[in-house]
Amino acid sequence: MGADVDLVVPVKALELAKSRLVGARLDRPALALAFALDTIAAALPVVRDVLAVTSDPAVVAELRALGVESVAGPEGLNESLRFGFGVLRSRDAGSVVGALQADLPALRTAELGAALAAARGRAFCPDRQGTGTTLLLSAPGGDLAPAFGVGSAAAHAASGAVALLGPWPSLRHDVDTAEDLGLAADLGLGPRTATVLMPVGG
């Protein structure tokens, strides 16, 4: 994809995040923060800009330390993505704007870069189950039109986005459950997530 790529990454309030990650020894807010930071840190080298949409002050502070801009937006995943898209589109009418999920703790920079390079127009990357979406890209200057939620992969395909199905497993392994986390760990977790989980294995 030749145009510059900017990403919107929505980050839910930490106390509300990852409610399906059950386990007495899992610190869900700390893991949710680590997931988001590892995801964004992996993305930064291969995109022009990252804009996080979050109102959680702990997230805002950590992102500021990474040099990442954040804005408070509306509740709801698609609503926050549309809000962030509008902010980025107002800065560059011809760019590619992408929506990246914040729960990809095994994300590899090279794999995200390869997926971005493979995209031709509006595109999306389905999750490992093939039903959800981890990455959605607009065409240059085009609308993002996010339809995240149950069955988002089918919804994005039906709206004309092309599936990105290359060799980038780390981009497809989002984490909602303990099983998902184990599979992501098999790929190799980012440093912040690994640090949060270290006491569990110790």
Image (spheres, grey):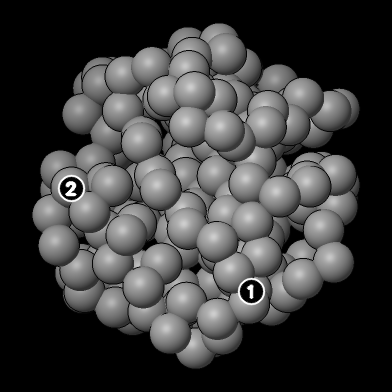
Above-or-below relation of 9 to 153: below
Q: Which mark is residue 76?
A: 2
Helix, strand or loop for disc 1: loop
Q: Residue at x 36, y 73 (%)?
A: 86
Q: Nearer the viewer, mark 1 or mark 2?
A: 1
- Quarter of the image with the N terminus is bottom right
Q: CA distance from mark 1 to mark 2?
A: 24 Å
Q: Is residue 133 left or right of residue 14?
A: right
Q: Identify residue type, mark 1.
A: Ser
Residue 21 image position (x, y, % from top left): 31, 24
* Residue 85 showing in the rendered view: yes
Going 29% across and 78% down the picture, which residue do you hit?
A: 71
Where is residue 127, by image quadrant?
top right
Residue at 40% over, 48% down: 145
Nearer to us in this view, 196 or 199: 196
Comes first in the chain, label 1 or label 2: 2
Q: Amino acid at mark 2?
A: Gly
Q: Is residue 174 visible?
A: no
Give coordinates of residue 200: x percent, y percent.
Answer: 45, 29
On residue 126, which mark appears?
Answer: none
Look at 47% across and 54% down and name the residue there. 144
- Where residue 163 appears, as percent x and y from the top left, is 68, 28
Give how far across and how far down residue 153 sits, in percent.
Answer: 50, 23
Kindly indicate the quadrant of the structure image that contains residue 26: top left
Q: Quadrant of residue 66?
A: bottom right
